[in-house]
Image (spheres, grey):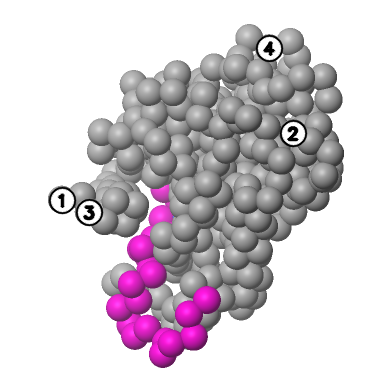
Amino acid sequence: MRTIAFFNNKGGVGKTSLVYHLAWMFSELGKRVLAVDLDPQSNLTSSFLDDDRVESLWSRPSGEDSILTAIQPIADHVGDVRAVNPIRIDAHLSLLAGDLGLGMFEDRVGEAWGRCLDDKASNAADAFRVMTAFHRVIRDCAQRGNADLALIDVGPSIGSLNRAALVAADFVVVPLGPDLFSLQGLRNLGPTLRDWRGGWAKRRADGKVPPGLDMPTGSMSPLGYVLLNPSVRENRPVQSYARWADRVPAVYRECVLGDSGPPPGDDDPSRLAMIKHFKSLMPMAQDARKPMFRLTPAEGAIGSHAAAVQNCAAQFRKLAEEIMRRMDPAAP
Ligand SMILES: Nc1ncnc2c1ncn2[C@@H]1O[C@H](COP(=O)(O)OP(=O)(O)OP(=O)(O)O)[C@@H](O)[C@H]1O
Ligand SMILES: [Mg+2]
């Protein structure tokens, strides 16, 4: 089972939309997918479930589980993670639902990070259980749903909650926009990822890990970035955005890959895809609670919209295939 986090501390760059569409696309391509909502805003959960279902999910007691149901005992210092059932969305797609209350876990994971290196074994053991909670819940849910791929959506921050989420990630994909703020975010993101990766490796090596605990590698390997264009003409960003898009390869290479070699040319190998802004297809798809590439004429996808649906399917299929190829370079 592979776990990919979609992460950028810049908000509103399309992380959630990307996870949602890729979850559907990977499942269309035959993967068994677990979509994981670790953002307390829980937009991914609202993308999958209609308003009534979301409301009932978050009113306690609820018949359905969220990530908070799973980690509540550990957050409350009364036990370890609880086994939960992901919500079945489709034959090959399940959702580990988010929760507006997840933010209450932030302080607990914040102080656990330092305590993993505590000399006292019982303190360190508790801290490692806290730091691995997301990983263990995701693994357990993936096993129950037979998932071979987990896609994690996180909020736009470089705080403790996201550090714990990223510790659970084998791979990271960076969604970004061609603008000043995205580039600034990228400059922060690279060192942050390196810091978290190195910090977790140190804790694994030097900390008193309780025997038998399922420990993630925390490898957070960068697979590449996805450029989400506010506006695209003939697959090229319009002029005002092109200036910013052109700067992304060098900044990604230097800040995320830590590589100070010559900047890559136009054909940047780290660019996984450039995804078009599909304008009104998105609100139509949100209304229908389905991905943009599955919209039908009955839902308004007629004329130029129908062509955009086809284009959207092609873009997401290509991106999903590229991600699979990069996770498994040896595969045919
Ligand atoms: N390819 C796209 N085509 C059209 N609209 C899009 C596309 N991608 C994202 N959007 C829209 O852009 C807005 C921001 O997207 P989204 O919520 O996915 O970003 P985010 O990075 O998850 O935000 P946050 O940082 O708040 O979690 C939303 O209104 C979404 O519907
Ligand atoms: Mg989001």
Q: Amino acid at mark 3?
A: Ala
Tell me the residue that label 3 is attached to.
Answer: 330
The structure residue drawn at horizontal position 46% and vertical position 42%, both measured from the top left corner, is 3
Which mark, by number, is residue 125?
2
Q: Earlier in the sequence, mark 2 or mark 3?
A: 2
Residue 243 percent location from the top left of the image: 48, 85
Label 1, secondary structure: give it. Answer: loop
Whether residue 16 appears in this view of the structure is no
Label 4 secondary element: loop
Can you say which quadrant of the picture contains the N terminus?
top left
User: Which comes before the other along the chain, label 4 or label 1?
Assistant: 4
Q: Which residues are magenta?
A: 258-281
User: x%, y% of residue 12?
Assistant: 61, 57
Q: Which mark is residue 332?
A: 1
**Circle 3: element type:** loop
Estimate the spatial distance between the alpha carbons at disc 3 and disc 1, rounded to whole Å: 7 Å
Amino acid type assigned to the residue bearing label 1 in the image: Pro
Which amino acid lies under the numbered mark 2 shown in the image of this protein? Ala
